[in-house]
Image (cartoon, helix red, strand yellow):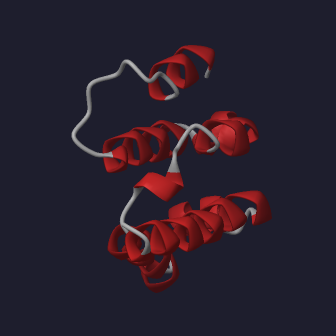
Amino acid sequence: PNELMTLIDSDEVKIQSELQIYDTALRWLLYDWNVRSEFAVVVMRCVRFGLLSPQQLTQIEHCAEAANTPDYCKIYCIPEIKKMLQDGLTFSILRENYK
């Protein structure tokens, strides 16, 4: 987890969108959830949800609810992660409205 967090939390990593960081964190966690679940909150804290667009955040939230799959439920049922997503959406909407 430390190597992953160093990579995804870096300001030097070359990405096209914060969505790539989100996908990387999500895939890493779900690859071996039974072992990696204890790191879910700290890994997802590396995702800058506020840099995602309101559309992307809404889609993430609705996909998690609509998918009704155990994988997504495992992650988004964690209150701290759900709050990160909601706070990111609020910030993203404000950022877009005050450009």
In the rendered image, the vertical position of residue 11 relative to residue 92, given as above or below: above
| Residue at x 65%, y 59% (from the top left corner) | 84
Residue 1 drawn at (x, y percent): 61, 22
Residue 78 drawn at (x, y percent): 74, 62
In the rendered image, the vertical position of residue 49 relative to residue 38, given as above or below: below
Residue that extends furthest to the front in the rendered view of this protein: 98
| Residue at x 46%, y 28% (from the top left corner) | 8
Along the horizontal axis of the image, is 78 left or right of 43? right
Along the horizontal axis of the image, is 58 left or right of 19? right
Front residue of 24 and 93: 93
The quadrant of the rendering that contains the C terminus is bottom left
- Image quadrant assignment for residue 96: bottom left
Residue that extends furthest to the bottom in the rendered view of this protein: 66
Front residue of 62 and 97: 97
Along the horizontal axis of the image, is 89 left or right of 15? right
The reply to whether residue 24 is visible in this rendering is: yes
Residue 75 drawn at (x, y percent): 62, 59
Q: How many marks?
A: 0
In the rendered image, the vertical position of residue 69 relative to residue 38, given as above or below: below
In the rendered image, the vertical position of residue 53 relative to residue 27, given as above or below: below
Residue 43 drawn at (x, y percent): 62, 37
